[in-house]
Amino acid sequence: MSTVKTPSKLRKAGSFLANNLVAVLFLILTIISIPVSGFSATYIVNEILSRIARNSFLVFSLILPIMAGMGINFGMVLGAMAGQIGLIFAMDWGISGIQGLVFASLIGIPISVFLGWIAGTILNKARGREMVTSYIIGFFFNGLYQFVVLYLFGSVIPMRNKAIYLSRGYGVRNTVDLSSVRQVLDNTLSFNIGPIHIPLLSYLIIGVLCVFIVWFKKTKLGQDMRAVGQDQVVSNTAGIAVEKTRVISIIISTVLACFGQIIFLQNMGNMSTYNAHDQTGFFAAAAILVGGATVTKATIPNCFIGVLLLHLMYIVVPRAGQNIFGDGNIGEYFRQFIGYGVIALSLVIHAWRTKRQAEHNREALHTAAEGDAK
C-alpha cells in the first residue's frame, strides 16, 4: 500500500512544484532576504498593506483579457495614460480630495474606452500574437501621449494652473504635485491596530472590484469570454460574437487600468508626467505571474498572492543587497532582473506545457487509433 501511495504523493508534489515554480522561487528568495534586510516586522507589514492597496487594482485589470484568451494585456498602459490625463485636468482645475479622484476618473473613462476599443480592434487582427502586439501598441500610444502633454496642453488645450505647466507657456511639467489628492483613499475610513495602519477605504474598493469580477464571470458576457478563451472556433460556431467579446475584454481592462493608475498615483502623492505609466504593464504582469497565473488562466487569489510576493521582494531585496555587498544599486539591479526574469520564465513554462500537452494528445490519438485497428 505504501509503495502505491509514495509515487502518487511524489507526482502530486512534482505537479504542484511545476504549477507554482515561480511563486515557490520567489518565496524562497524572500525568506532568505528578510533577515538579511534588517527590517522590522512592523515596517514590512505596513509596507505590504500599503502596496497591496496601491497596486492590486492594476493587477486585477489583467484578469478578463486572460480569461478571453488574449494573454497578458500589456496594452493596459493605455488606461494608465488616460488616468494620468484625468489627474492633470483635476490638478489644473484645482479639484482636491476624493472629488478630484472622481473627476479624474470621469475624464479618464471615455479616453480609456476609446483607446481600449482601438487596441482591441488591432489585437483582433493579430490573433496568436496578442501579447507582443499589445506591448508595441503601448509604445505607439506613448508617443501620442507625450505629444499631447508636451505640446497640446497649454497651446490647444487651455490650462489655468501655472504651477503645472512649463515656463514657456505650454506643456506639462515633468513632475505634477498631487498633494491635494495625496492618500485621500488611504486615510479615509482608515484605522490603526497598534503600529499597523489599515487603509480601509482602499481595501473596500478592491473588495468591490473582486465582487464585480466574480459577478461578471457568471453573466452571459463573462461566460462568452470564458468560452472564447477556451476555443474561438467552437465559440463562433455556437453563435458568440468572438471579435466583439475580445474587444470588450480589452476595453474593460483598459478602464480598470485607468482607475488603478489613479489609485496608485494618489498613494504616491506626485506624478512623473512622462514616464509614470512606462512600467505599469510590466509590474502588473510580473505580479500576476508570480501569483501562479498563466497566460491562459488567472484568478483573484493569483492577484493577491502575486502582489504580496512581488512587493515583499521589492521591499527586502534591495536592502539585503546593500547589507551584503555594501551597495544598494546591486539590490535594485537584481530586482529589475528578477522582474523581467519572472515574465520570461512564465512564458517559457507556458510554451513547454503547451508543447507537452500537444504531444500527450497526439499519443492519446495514436493509441486510440491502434486500438480501433485491432
Image (cartoon, rainbow, N blue to C red):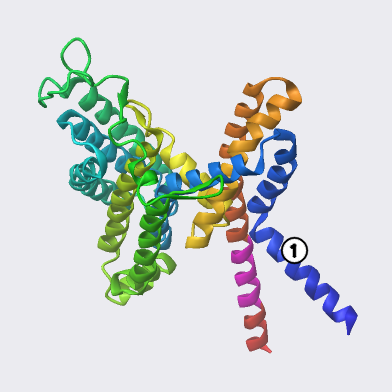
**Nearer to me, 236 or 205:** 205
Part of the protein shown in magenta: 356-366
Confirm whether residue 163 shows in the render. Answer: yes
Residue 206 lies, with reference to residue 277, above or below; the image says: below
Element under disc 1 = helix
Query: In the image, 159: left or right of 30?
Result: left
Q: Is residue 357 magenta?
A: yes
| Three-letter code, disc 1 | Gly
Residue drawn at 37 percent across, 73 percent down: 234
Query: In the image, 263: left or right of 371?
Result: left
Q: Quadrant of the C terminus?
A: bottom right
Q: Is residue 168 magenta?
A: no
The picture places residue 132, in percent across and down from the top left corner, at 43, 43
**Nearer to me, 38 or 371:** 38
The picture places residue 112, in percent across and down from the top left corner, at 24, 45
Confirm whether residue 343 shows in the render. Answer: no
Query: In the image, 198: left or right of 264?
Result: right
Residue position for label 1: 14
Residue 11 lies, with reference to residue 333, above or below; the image says: below
Residue drawn at 25 percent across, 30 percent down: 144
Residue 49 lies, with reference to residue 176, above or below; the image says: below
**Nearer to me, 205 or 363:** 205
Q: Quadrant of residue 273?
A: top left
How many numbered marks does the figure carry? 1
**Nearer to me, 211 or 128:** 211
Question: Crowdedness of circle 1 by 10 Å Cα count: few (<14), some, many (20+)?
Answer: few
Residue drawn at 32 percent across, 51 percent down: 256
The picture places residue 197, in percent across and down from the top left corner, at 49, 46
